[in-house]
Structures are given as structure tokens and as C-alpha cells.
Image (cartoon, rainbow, N blue to C red):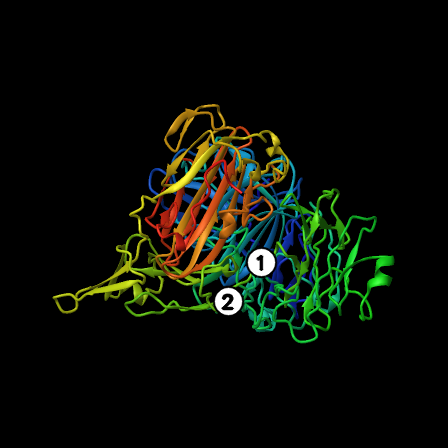
Amino acid sequence: MKQAATNLLALASTAYAAASSPAGTKSGCYWNTDAGQFNTRFGHDFSIDLYGTVENLIPSTYTVNQGVNPLARRFDIANIGFDGVEKALTLTVPGGQSNGPISVAQLATSYSDILYGSVRTVAKISNVPGTTHGFIFYANDTQEVDFAFLTSDTSKAWLTNEQVTYTSPYSTYSVAAPGDASSAYHEYRLDWLPGVSKFYIDGVLVQTITDNAPSTPGSWIWNNWSNGNAWAQGPPLSDSVLKIRSIDGYFNRTTVADNINLNPSSCPAVSSSSSSVAPSSTVVSSSSSSAVSSTSSSVKSSSSSVVSSSSSVAPSSSSIVSSSSTVSSSSVATTSSATLSSSSSSSSSVAPATSSSAAAVTNFYIKDANNKLVNVPSGQDGVANYVTSQNSATSFYIDSKTGYLYETGAPYAANRGTSAKPEITYFSTIGLGYSYITCSQNTAQTWLECKANGVAQQAMTCGNDGLLYFAPTIPSTCVWVPLYYVSSTSASVSASSVASTTSSSSSSSSSSVAPTTSSTSPSVAPTTSSVAAQATVSFTTITTAWTGTFTTTTTAVSGLAATVYVQTPAKKGDVISTSSTAKASYTTVTTHSGTAGSVGYITATPKVAGATTTVTVVYPTPVTTCGNQGINFAAYTNKYSGGQATYGYPSFSPEAYKKVSPWFSDDTTYIAESNDGSGTKINVYGYGPLDASTLVLDHTFYLFASQTGYYSLNVPYTDDIQFVWVGSKAVTGWTRANADITQFWSSQIATQTPQTLAYYLTVGTYLPIRTLFANGGGQGDLRFNIYAPDGTSVLSSNAGQNSGVSSVDIVEFPCNSALGAQFPAWGKET
């Protein structure tokens, strides 16, 4: 059934039936416990009011001209209608079209000033091949987030932070869609928050993407389209219909219509955290939508509340305390930081900085050597207790004065502190400025972890009542990890789940030289190479329009601050960047030469006045007169094959190969291995063809610091397991338990999170590194990358190609033994 959607005009002030999350009146801020506070709420439940006026939602009526292949597509209002039987709004691409423009359908918000939002769409996907369904935030072609479905394959949902020119492999993912996506209604939710996009299906977080996260205000769009290209695989032979039962959106708008009578500045900034706590310790239980049960709840807030921060992860050995980051909403820059022990590659970021006036001081609390919380005000430095053994207790609380984690029941009476009452897990800050454990209902988020055989295990989880409980199984070998707090946020995380965020601010205005990024290091730079000098690397992306016809990307790194300058071809109405159109005054090139103990600079002054000046940066290189170039490796047969199916591959013991003579050994100039699991034999570092399905590869080398600053070590993906050791323990004493990075494949992990560590090195020093990889059977994949402080690649793997490259700064050992000892011989290690 079709009906012209002439009543799809504009609204945000009238009452309506919510798709899934209740809210207060229009006189205050709208609280969404999963995403934060917003100044505008929008939505309509078509199952309750099918033909009613839907304001602030308008049909698109324009044509996208794309030539002959792909065909042009035209958004027609006639393709928007209603299904009276299923009580749903319909967006239709009529079948049988062969020539362009293809008639398609699209709805968009009437306002284009949305700066962050959380939107739930309850919909049923078409299974007629040839169209693409999209639930989208859109500002321009590089400021776009897509929650998309191809009707030619409804088993997958495609999730992306759009990039016109490929710059990152971590901005697009496909995830499994519900098995009955084309026959039943499901809730598809997109949260666009500062520095991050989060995607949910039926209330379950299925993907988080931080690369290329938008930062420019725009519109929200729902569409069903085809243009005959290879992606959409259309046009469809018969009608392809997207059915939408309800829409529920929370938005922050940079300007708010008069009829809302709301000052947007009264609402605290939204955060990139996925768990928030409602102000005034009030929890409103969620209601069910017409199609699916909601997992979120909301309350109205009239006062500033705690702004959530990212729950990213960092090594527990880190002693860094950092400041929160504030980014102007009018800036085109987005700031985020690469996390330490389980995050992103050097060129991408995963722990978005939080913009908040309420959290302008220390953002994270981290334990010092005396098990005290760092930088906590005097008298408020309670030590987080930890559970020493399994027992019958099922729920826990944190005492608000002592900060200890206790079991309920008898241990409470015996161990409680001076608090009048314990903090309940889902309540917000009371008194001391701490925010405690937050559990979102119906989620299985681990907050306290233990380690068994060196692998972090899920030990505690959230129950449906919002309390914290033991997970179903806990290994008997668990060693419990202390709990940590996050200041001015709503989430507490474990010692294996804490990160620091560097303070940085960006400016997109500049002269003829590249824009300057100011950055505050989270700690004083160490004077020696040390594993205690781990820290985050903060990446800022500045996107500007310019007069060129192509997109350019330039990365500038200074210590922990990295800036990616993206220049895109200007469209009509764009403000042209002065830095893009101005004639360059300087060109900087780098080279590696000689063995001097410092970095040199050579300036070539042009002979013609006004011409470009070239500045050559000369980095020193390691001494290689002793024949030490490259990376040592040893290959073994995996004696623990078949155990990779168990989460974390706990049966694998890297120490078992210390006294084993290798299958073969040699040196290499890169670290990589890839086989497709088909049984086809491959070459490994020039040896073969051989069966690599049960292969173990151990690698040892030294990283020479040609620059002073933070070097990033990155494991983007592995199959089945990979360990990295850094410092003296990489030479001797390495075990599974003391690995600095552990990355493993599991069928329970939809998408592996890249693991990254940063180490501060002084020019002329050497850092020993070991990485050991094992394939337990079938397909295998080994990758390892290292980035210098200026962002250049020191070591890189070509994904899936059994190849890679390293710079001159990678050596087997220093020629001067006083700068670093050689690694023990294979089979004779300790």
C-alpha cells in the first residue's frame, strides 16, 4: 500500500509515541543513559499513529547525477508510503527500471545542524536484490556515518565512517545481521558521539568505529536506493521495500528552533562513552517499543551532570595521569587517542577525547607503585580491594568512603568502611567526586577481570537488574586484578582496562605553513628508554576544503601529538582553507644518514626570491659494521595445535620453545605470515613451500631510536595468537604472563581490536623487542608494525601478502654490546 507522504513536514515540540526510549518534557535536556544528554528529541511510532503528521522529517526530491554507470538516481516523494497491514512507513524502489535516473526514496531531518546524536530505527529489510538501505548521518562525503544493508545479502550489515579517498582500513566493517532481518522487525541504532560511531542491533553493541569519525553538523537520513553499480547490484527486478515501524532520536543541535524554547547550552556536552549514569541517582526503567524491547532508559535532567568518558584500555604498569581534552564544537578537528594495550594502529584512534566543562582536570586515576590512586585529593585515596577467591556471593558493591569492593552479606558487615551506605552499582557520583561501576541493563560488559595463564578472563558481568555479578565460569587459576576508578565519569574499569587521554586542542587556521597543534604530554618525558615510559599517542584530524581536484592527506607528529591534515576538493558553498590555497613557503624532507648522536637539519635557500625553501631533516642511523642488519627468526611446529578454539588459546605456552631447536632459523627484513587455510603450501621468509597451518614463528630484534619521542608498536590483527615483549624481558625471562601485548583470534570476537603500545626513546638508544606468533590450525595471519615519533613507518606488514618492509633502524643487536646484549641462541634461551 502506498500513500503520498505530503504530511511529512516538520516537528520537535509535540508529543509523540517513542520508538524505544522514554524522555521528559520539552522544557529540559533529554537524558539517554547509553549516550548522554541532548537538547532535542525526535521520533514517531508508526505502529501507533500510522498516518499522523510527522514533523521535522521531510522527503528528498532531488537527483544524483552519476552518468551511465552507475546510473543517476532520483529521490521521488511518490516512493514514500505506508503499509496499513504491518503499520509501517515504506520507502520503495520500484522494480523493472533499466535506465536512469532510477526512481528511489529518501527521508531526512528538516534541520541540518545536528552535532552528535543517538538514533534508533525499528525496521524490516527487503530481500529483493538490487538496492541499499541506509540509516545515515550526513554532512558531506567525508563527514558521514552509514548503517547500511545490501538487499542482495541480508545476512550482513555494513558499518562505516565514510572516507572518499582510502586512508584507513579501520573505518568500515561488516557484521552479522539478524537471521530474520527480512522477515521481522529489529532495532538498528546508530550513536554518533565525539570521535566515535557506535552501532547496535537489538540493543547489543556490535561495532565501534573511531577512524574518520565526523565532527561537522549535518542531517539524519533514511533511504532505499539503487544506481546500478556493483555495490547495490541493481536496479531491482521487482519492488524493493524498506519498512520502518518507528524512529526514536536524541540530537544535539547547534541551533534550536524557537518553538522548542530551550537553551542548548544548558545541556552538558555528550560523551563518547557508551555507559552513562543518570543525574540525581534516579533510574527510570526502559519501556518496550512496538517491535523490540529496549535496553535503554532515560530521565529528564535540569542540571549539569557527569559526562562519561571512554572506557579504553592501557597496561596496568602505566603511571601516567593525564588531563581531559576540550575541543571546540566549532572546530573541524576531531581529537582522539590511540589506546595503549588494546587499541588502534598508529594512524587511527580509539579513545575519543571528551569535551566537557565539568571534567577539565584529571580524567583518569591510575594506581602508583604503592597501590594508591594517583593524583587523588588528600584523604580520598582509597585503595580498590580485590576478591581473593571464588565463593557463593553473587553481588558486590563499592564502599563510598573507603573505595573497597565488597561482597554483599556477611563480608559487608565485617569489612565495610565509614560510609553511611554503600554505593549501588548503577548510581551516580555522591560526595567524594568518584563515579562507580555502571551497568547498563541487559549488557554483558566486563568491569573486573582476572588473569589465568596470562590471559584476561571475563570474571564479573552486569545482570539485568543493573548489578554486578560473577560470570558463569571463572577459571580456578584466576589471579584477581585490582579495580580502578575513573574520575568525573560514570564508569569504573579494571587494571587491565584503564587508559589515559592526552590533552590537546587544535586550530584549523594557519599561514602557508601547516597548522600548528598544541599538545600537553601526560607526563614529563623520560630521560631513558624504559617500559615504564608507555603512553598514548593523540591524533587530531583537520579536514579543510581547497581548490585542488583531489584529496590530500599529510601526517605531522610531534611527540605524543599527531595531526592528520586532510584537504578535500571544495564544493559549492564550502569555505576555502587559507592554508590550502596559499603558496607553500617550505618543503620538508627527511633522510637517514650517518651515525651521529643527534638529529641534523639542512636548509637549502632558494636562489629565486619567493621560491620554496627545502629543509632536510637528517636522522642518525645505527652502526651496522658488525653485520647486524635485519631481524632474527626461528620457526617451530606448534605442539599445542587444535587448542585455538578455546577463547584466549590458554593451552599455548610460548615458554615451551625456549629449549627447543628450531625447525629452521635465519634472518628477515620484515615480520608477516599469511595463509588462507586451504592447505596450499606457502613460502615463509624464503623457506618452502611448506605447510604453515601449525607454524610457530619467534622474532627478536632491536629498535634503534633515530629520533627522540614516542615509538608506537602495533599488532592490528592476528590468527591465532601473538605475543610482544619489550625491554630486558624480551631478551631473557619472557613468559606468557609478562607479555606486553597479547593478541588472539576467537570466534567470539566479531572484530579484533588493534593492540598498540607507545614507548619513549632517546635518540641513539636501542630497545630490545621480541614477538612470537602461533597458528593452531587452518588459516593463519601475522602482522606487526612500528611507527616513529614523526609518524613514519619503521616496520610494517603487508596484510595477507607474506611480505613487509623495515627501515635501517631495525637491527638484530647493537654493534656496541654496552648498548644492548645479543639475544641468546635459539634452543638455549632462558
The amino acid sitting under disc 2 is: Pro
Mark 1 nearby-residue class (10 Å; few <14, some 14–19, many ≥20): some
Horizontal and vertical percent position of residue 73: 41, 43
Would residue 799 be seen by someone viewing this image from the given angle? no
Q: Closer to the camera, 481 or 408?
A: 481
As measured in the structure, the alpha-carbon distance from the residue carrying label 1 to the one carrying label 2 is 15 Å
Farthest bottom residue?
378
Could you tell me which residue is drawn at 58 percent across and 62 percent down?
A: 271
Name the residue that disc number 1 marks: 317
The N terminus: image quadrant = top right
Q: Closer to the camera, 233 or 409?
A: 409
Name the residue that disc number 2 marks: 522
The amino acid sitting under disc 1 is: Ser
C-beta proximity under 8 Å, tags 1 and 2: no
Mark 2 nearby-residue class (10 Å; few <14, some 14–19, many ≥20): many
Q: Nearer the viewer, mark 1 or mark 2?
A: 1
Q: Earlier in the sequence, mark 1 or mark 2?
A: 1
Could you tell me which residue is drawn at 31 percent across and 60 percent down?
A: 546
Horizontal and vertical percent position of residue 117: 57, 59
The answer to whether residue 94 is left or right of residue 478 is left
Q: Closer to the camera, 256 or 491?
A: 491
Could you tell me which residue is drawn at 56 percent across and 69 percent down?
A: 356
Horizontal and vertical percent position of residue 353: 52, 63
